[in-house]
Image: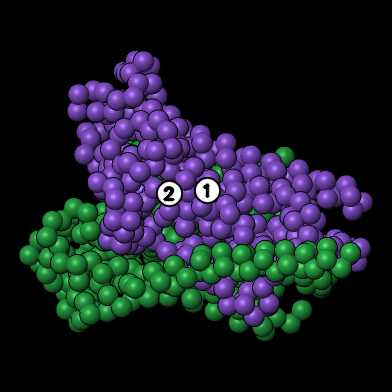
Chain colours: A purple, B green
Amino acid sequence: MDKNITRHESLITFFIKSTGYSAIVFVGMIFIFLLLEGLPAIQKVNLATLFSSRWYPIEDYFGLLPLIGGSLIITLGAILIAVPFGIGSAVYLSEIAPRWVRDLMKPFIEILGGLPSVVLGFLGMLILSPFLRKLLELPTGLTALTGSILLGGIAIPTVVSVAEDALDAVPKSFRDASLAIGATEWQTIWRVTLPAARSGVLTAIMLGVGRAIGETMTVMMVTGNAPILPKGINDLFSPVRTMTATIAAEMGEVASGSVHYHVLFLIGIVLFLISLIVNITASAVVFRQKKRQERILS
Amino acid sequence: MKSSSHLRYKQQQFGFSLLTIMTFLTIIPIAGVVIYILVLGTPAISWEFIFGFPRGGMREGGIWPAIVGTFYLTLGTAAFAVPIGIGAAIYLSEYAPDNKATRLIRIAIINLAGIPSVVYGLFGLGLFVLFLQFGTSILAGSLTLSIMTLPVIISTTEEALKSVPQAFRTVSISVGATKWQTIRKIILPQALPGILTGVILGLERAAGETAPILFTVAAFFLPRLPSSPLDATMALPYHLFVISTQVPGMPIKIQYGTALVLLVFVLSMNIIATTIRSRARARRQW
């Protein structure tokens, strides 16, 4: 009987241990498959073409710059919205709002995090884009700006929840000390609490960037999908096309194994690497902060 | 002196009102979106719309195949993601030593959470649809979605396991239980509400996603119910995308109706999850 228990136990322990490493296996597999399908693109298309500013796959123009530029300008716009509103809401919820307001509002922000992106894209097409077209007198409402506003909304829940956790983790004694020497609550927030939560707030922004740059359906539905290289801030008001939208829109129509197919996987590699850099930077900030806290506390 | 403190008070008042307004500007559109879809979608809802099959180039009839498809996909995702996710969380919370390998696992989980959904779609296409030859099928889509869901399930489950006090483990081991018996009989039951919350929130994300199923499952128009895991299927999020961008002359009512059904599907999962969590918190004995 004892033997049975031991065998049972070691089997289960084995299962648990192997699932423990599953995350590493999956990240590795994703990267390997992207490389396998994406790298042939570099052999088949010369680099000058890839770094050109013309994307027109039917005639073998595979310039990635307009797509990368499109992703960047939309993400930049989204961050300009998500950072002030996200951090502002986090500060309000964590430092200012009475408890009942906080308990009432947090579920709303969680709901925003759970709204399917296709629903936001749908409303963006039907409401936001015609509204912006009339308001700004543009030829079309399907612009980078429309995408930025919606992506800002999508990134906000991430920014709010991570930043709020960071603010929450600042010891109460910090605030008490500041208030005791005569600072107002407002001064305490800006000069004590926020600086103390700096690294968590930075992580929040990084994760928001990651969320925005990877979003697909919403941008595909509202940005007009014109692969034109944005050259300045004015291009916020014209249609653009992102890397994610290009993959989503074109992968369904290409023959597997064609040059176009491999180039789309190459874009996938670019996106994968961007998210890798963003997330490793974000987590490195957290790790460093933890170490510093341990040092201070010991 | 008096005027400076007055000024500082004014400054604080101004700052507080500004942040309050910003927070409300964030919250109001969210409530607006939900209410708007509720109001415009409700007139489309009927017995035929929910349980009927699409007809007339999807411009008439119902969306039953898409609802069933999304339901199957969510179940399929759960079948893969729940055992692996809970297993991984048990490992991290109860077994993992504090070393480099464990840190690598954590970084991998953070990265899985950050990979764009459309890249999951590419991966699913490359591995499950083409390499393993599952074809565009519920199986391929569920596997793709389950890998995407894993980080949510792992991190919330781990948090739930870690919130069970250490004393519970010590007592159980000291009366002679093995490690696995302790986990199964003591820790898992205590952490169950937290685990359920995490699982449902993960599945909620899977149910609402479009990009990962674009090339792995989704059928543009397939007016029958899938009969095996190797069948393609319609799915609610993809169906909403199709009827709002790809079909000209689509009645707006059907679009809002579909958006409403998707929203109710996803939000009811969200509400169930948060209810379980807040109930468990209120009842917690330690």
Residue drawn at x 23%, y 66% as measured from the top left: B255
Q: Secondary structure at mark 1?
A: helix
* Neighbourhood count class around disc 1 (C-alpha, 10 Å): few under 14, some 14–19, many 20 upward: some
Q: Quadrant of the N terminus of chain A?
A: bottom right
Choose the circle earlier in sequence order: 2 or 1: 1
In the picture, residue A164 is in which quadrant? Answer: bottom right
* Residue closest to the eye, B261 or A78: A78
Residue with the mark numbered 1: A80
Q: Is residue A40 left or right of residue B51?
A: right
Instruction: From the image, tell me which residue sits under label 2.
Output: A148
Q: CA distance from mark 2 to mark 1?
A: 9 Å
Q: Position of residue A137 (x, y in %)?
A: 29, 50
Q: Are marks 2 and 1 in contact (CB under 8 Å)?
A: yes
Q: Is residue B243 visible?
A: yes
Q: Is residue A248 among the parts visible in the rendering?
A: no
Total numbered circles: 2
Residue A287 pos. (x, y %): 73, 45
Give the residue displayed 26% in from the left and 54% down from the top: B218
Q: Amino acid at mark 1?
A: Leu
Q: Position of residue B247 (x, y in %)?
A: 15, 56
Residue farthest bottom in this picture: B283
Q: Please identify the residue farthest to the left as the structure is shown.
A: B56
Position of B31 relative to A5 (above/below) = below
* Residue at position x 33%, y 28% in the image: A263
Instruction: In this rendered view, identify the residue nearer to me: A88 or B49.
Output: A88
Front residue of B151 and A87: A87
Give the residue type that dot 2 points to.
Answer: Ser
